[in-house]
Image: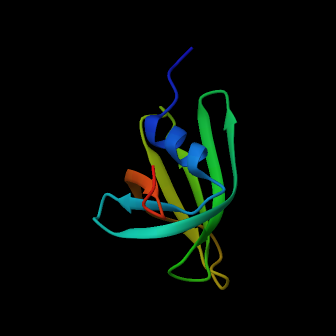
Amino acid sequence: MAELNRLAKRIHNISPNPVRLTLDDGSSAVYQLSSTQWFQTEFQGEGTCDADDADYRLTTTEDESAVIVGRKAPDDDGWRMVGEVVEVERADGGD
């Protein structure tokens, strides 16, 4: 069986507590995930961000090598790609 994505495992283990995600563009924000789940080695999570009132969806890429973030604001017709997660930490700074 393929190995689970390291960042996705960290997100899953921290939630439902707030998690700080740093994306590949250098931006960082706190996300509150309402659900995370595994489908064998594929990861999915849904929640909100402290920066706005949009919905966020996290998922591993097709080859499970990365975790990507999608965003859908209340007035958007669909999801748009926000970026790739490069760092995960507890929002409270603990380990």
The front one of 78 and 30 is 30
The front one of 10 and 86 is 10
The front one of 18 and 59 is 18
The x, y position of residue 50, in whole percent, is: 54, 77
The quarter of the rendered structure image containing the N terminus is top right
Number of dots carrying numbers? 0
Placement of 15 over or under 26, stated as above or below: above
The x, y position of residue 26, in whole percent, is: 28, 65
Residue lying farthest left? 26
* Residue at position x 45%, y 62% in the image: 20
* Residue at position x 33%, y 69% in the image: 27
Indicate the quadrant where residue 82 lies. bottom left
Placement of 64 over or under 56, stated as above or below: above
* Residue at position x 48%, y 64% in the image: 92
Placement of 14 over or under 5, stated as above or below: below
Residue lying farthest front? 94
Classify residue 51 as left or right of residue 13. left
* Residue at position x 50%, y 81% in the image: 51
The x, y position of residue 37, in whole percent, is: 69, 42
The chosen color scheme is rainbow
